[in-house]
């Protein structure tokens, strides 16, 4: 029972990062109908920024806001350089463009930085634990869960209580109609990428704190986890993305802990099997969205 | 009449001299042609030529004492002393061509990038020092882009370009593509692979490293010698990440130790070991050794989480992946043991090679150990050519298969009596105050 409780907190901690990544993907999908496979590159880019800052003696108090800021700028930059030119193009074109961005960013770091692992220090408290009720929880997990919850609340407020949120939701509902109603599409899309970048930036801070390293391909795993969580939750749904992220994190940790030793190595395979089963019974994921574009 | 006779004699004399000169030239051409023939045989029709060469070479190899061979090898020390800025004329003539089918992507670039740079630099040094018995070395490097199909294409291009020996990428899946193209006609050296199934002398496939059996055995024997009786392993099914812990367990338990739990993880990706740590916390008493082939940032993350649970007395022992992925640049690395391929001894050959590279290029090589392994691959290939006195692939391979105590940059290695995976000591290191220190060279 004790171990189960610890596993649940561990799973929620891991799932929080997935949820933030999935949320960023869902926001972009909402306004552009783009399943952004370049989302993980924000982790790659910020990883090298963290590495460069670490080399210059920066602490995580400096690195964390830097990562957040760079993620926002990079996300908007990628939109300006790549996605701006394919707005309104068929979905397939958008997906191919996102793959193109992924490969270009990876190749750039390979060519101009290094293929080798670049290490940087994790925060000193990352493995510290706090005991409560006979349970031992990692402070890191508690911080990640707390920050994620605050971020989700703020994101929800942004979307529900601000003009930008209204414009974003209107654009997602019907982009052309929103434009006719005076919504400035350019601004909405840039804002969506900024929001997506901010969410990825927060996820990146925690991802990089755990990893303590980066490589040119560092963004692939977070991208896959984020896309998977968004799909599991129901593509196009913010609520679904969050649910998908937490579900994926919990499934990974609980299955890893509960599967018999002989098949524990197949944890990822079992997770995918469960996802396949989910899609058989709920093809749209946990939250079915009537209009895929809805934010 | 006399004039005619004199003219005839003069003409005869001129012809005679011309004929002598011609003989000299022909002999020179013959040598060149022999080389060309051998090349042609290698590329297109190695058939009988190759076989005969191979037999002769094997005999020659056997006659030589191998190690440094009855046939002299490259004078490594002279090459390291060469002054690249001295303006010495490089040797001319048909070069020994070393083809490198390298993967510069993020999967293998950690080894192939510094490795290829080291070999090119070594070739410059050797050429600067007069070449190999006056023969220049030429290095051809091609990127296989992490793709087996490209690897096959690149290999064919290197063969078409006349490569006498090839150096292949680290991992067996792509290495197999290279071997399928060479079909044993050119020796292929894998400088950064420890895959036990990759070497096969019968198809001219050689490792220049010890294999996983050797490094896991060394680790287990070392753990036993240190008095450890309980171990925890972290593994993932499959080659390397699964093979090393599996062999470690076999040897450790055969020596009287017990592996109390084997935890699984996802290689390269996992940095959160919460689930495993929770389980271990209920099993471990803090005196065990933790063995894994995981990457450096993974072992330090795992260590942090275990220490967070109060398991502060565990000893950590791992494979050559630790060094390859930057253990020395990790925090929380103090006291971690790892097996690797060489110790960069100050003033030693490898140290001199690395310094020479840095001096020539302004930046250091990213991995000294792998640089040494790739340089050794080139040297072993050259030694094979020298020992067999030929340039046909099967002949070179046969000579390499006879090598004993070849001493290059990463320690002595012997191919004689093996199937292409050399016997060589396993270098066991420990990080002390952020510095890699040599614990033992495990035979």
Image: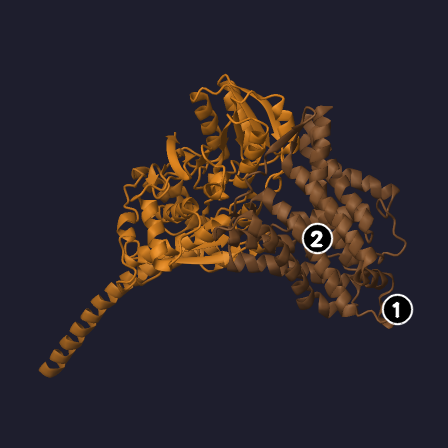
Chain colours: A brown, B orange
The tag earlier along the polypeptide, 1 or 2, is 1
> Can you give x and y, in whole percent of width and height, for residue A246 in the image?
76, 41
The one nearer the camera, B261 or A211, is: A211
Judged left or right of residue A32, residue B221 is: left
The one nearer the camera, B387 or A155, is: A155
Any part of residue B34 in sight: no
Farthest residue toward the left? B2
Q: Which mark is residue A168?
A: none
Query: In percent of the image, x 52 and y 53: which residue is there?
Result: A53
The one nearer the camera, B86 or B163, is: B86
The 10 Å Cα crowd at callout 1, few under 14, some 14 to 19, many 20 or more, is: few
Q: Chain of mark 2?
A: A
The one nearer the camera, B211 or B399, is: B211
- Locate residue B273: give its quadrant: top right
Q: Which residue is mark 2?
A: A199
Q: Chain of mark 1?
A: A
């Amino acid at each position: 029972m004790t171990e189960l409780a610890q596993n649940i907190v561990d799973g929620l901690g891991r799932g929080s990062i997935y949820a933030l990544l999935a949320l960023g993907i869902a926001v972009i999908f909402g306004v552009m109908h783009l399943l952004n496979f370049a989302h993980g590159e924000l982790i790659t880019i910020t990883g090298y920024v963290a590495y460069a800052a670490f080399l210059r003696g920066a602490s995580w108090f400096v690195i964390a806001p830097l990562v957040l800021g760079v993620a926002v700028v990079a996300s908007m930059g990628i939109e300006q350089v790549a996605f701006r030119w394919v707005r309104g193009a068929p979905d397939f074109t958008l997906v191919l463009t996102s793959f193109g961005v992924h490969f270009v960013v990876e190749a750039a770091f390979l060519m101009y930085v290094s293929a080798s692992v670049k290490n940087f220090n994790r925060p000193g408290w990352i493995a510290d634990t706090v005991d409560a009720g006979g349970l031992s929880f990692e402070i890191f997990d508690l911080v990640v869960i707390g920050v994620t919850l605050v971020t989700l609340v703020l994101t929800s407020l942004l979307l529900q209580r601000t003009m930008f949120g209204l414009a974003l939701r209107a654009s997602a509902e019907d982009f052309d109609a929103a434009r006719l109603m005076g919504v400035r599409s350019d601004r909405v899309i840039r804002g969506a990428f900024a929001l997506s970048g901010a969410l990825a930036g927060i996820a990146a801070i925690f991802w990089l704190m755990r990893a303590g390293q980066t490589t040119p391909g560092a963004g692939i795993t977070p991208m896959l986890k984020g896309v998977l969580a968004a799909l599991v939750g129901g593509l196009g749904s913010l609520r679904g993305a969050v649910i998908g992220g937490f579900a994926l994190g919990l499934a990974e940790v609980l299955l890893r802990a509960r599967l018999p030793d002989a098949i524990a190595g197949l944890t990822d395979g079992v997770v995918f099997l469960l996802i396949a089963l989910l899609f058989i019974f709920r093809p749209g994921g946990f939250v079915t969205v009537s209009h895929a574009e809805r934010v | 009449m006399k004039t005619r006779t004199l003219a005839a004699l003069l003409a005869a004399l001129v012809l005679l001299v011309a004929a002598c000169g011609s003989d000299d030239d022909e002999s020179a051409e013959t040598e060149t042609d022999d080389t060309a023939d051998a090349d042609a045989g290698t590329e297109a029709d190695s058939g009988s030529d190759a076989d005969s060469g191979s037999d002769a070479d094997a005999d020659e190899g056997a006659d030589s004492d191998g190690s440094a061979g009855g046939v002299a090898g490259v004078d490594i020390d002279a090459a390291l002393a060469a002054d690249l800025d001295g303006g010495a004329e490089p040797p001319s003539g048909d070069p020994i061509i070393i083809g490198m089918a390298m993967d510069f992507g993020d999967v293998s670039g950690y080894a192939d990038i510094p490795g290829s740079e080291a070999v090119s630099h070594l070739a410059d040094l050797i050429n600067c020092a007069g070449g190999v018995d006056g023969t220049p070395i030429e290095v051809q490097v091609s990127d296989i882009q992490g793709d087996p199909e490209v690897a096959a294409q690149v290999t064919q291009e290197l063969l078409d370009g006349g490569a006498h020996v090839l150096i292949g990428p680290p991992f067996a899946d792509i290495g197999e593509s290279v071997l399928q193209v060479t079909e044993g006609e050119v020796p292929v050296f894998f400088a950064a692979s420890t895959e036990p199934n990759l070497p096969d002398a019968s198809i001219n496939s050689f490792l220049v490293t010890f294999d996983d059996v050797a490094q896991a055995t060394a680790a287990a024997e070392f753990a036993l010698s240190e008095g450890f009786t309980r171990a925890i392993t972290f593994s993932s099914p499959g080659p390397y990440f699964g093979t090393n812990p599996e062999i470690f367990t076999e040897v450790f338990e055969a020596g009287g130790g017990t592996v109390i739990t084997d935890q699984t993880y996802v290689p390269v990706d996992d940095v959160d070991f919460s689930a495993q740590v929770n389980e271990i916390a209920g099993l471990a008493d803090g005196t065990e050794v933790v063995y894994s082939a995981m990457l450096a940032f993974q072992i330090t993350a795992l260590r942090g989480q275990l220490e967070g649970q109060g398991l502060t007395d565990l000893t950590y022992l791992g494979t050559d992946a630790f060094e390859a992925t930057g253990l020395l640049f990790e925090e929380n690395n103090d006291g971690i043991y790892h097996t690797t391929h060489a110790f960069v001894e100050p003033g030693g050959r490898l140290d001199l090679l690395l310094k020479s590279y840095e001096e020539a290029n302004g930046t250091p090589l990213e991995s000294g150990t792998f640089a040494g392994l790739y340089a050794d691959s080139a040297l072993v290939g050259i030694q094979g050519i020298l020992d067999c006195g030929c340039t046909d692939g099967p002949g070179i391979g046969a000579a390499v298969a006879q090598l004993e105590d070849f001493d290059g940059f990463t320690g002595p290695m012997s191919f004689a009596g093996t199937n292409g995976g050399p016997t060589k000591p396993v270098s066991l290191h420990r990080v002390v105050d952020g510095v890699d220190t040599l614990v033992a060279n495990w035979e």
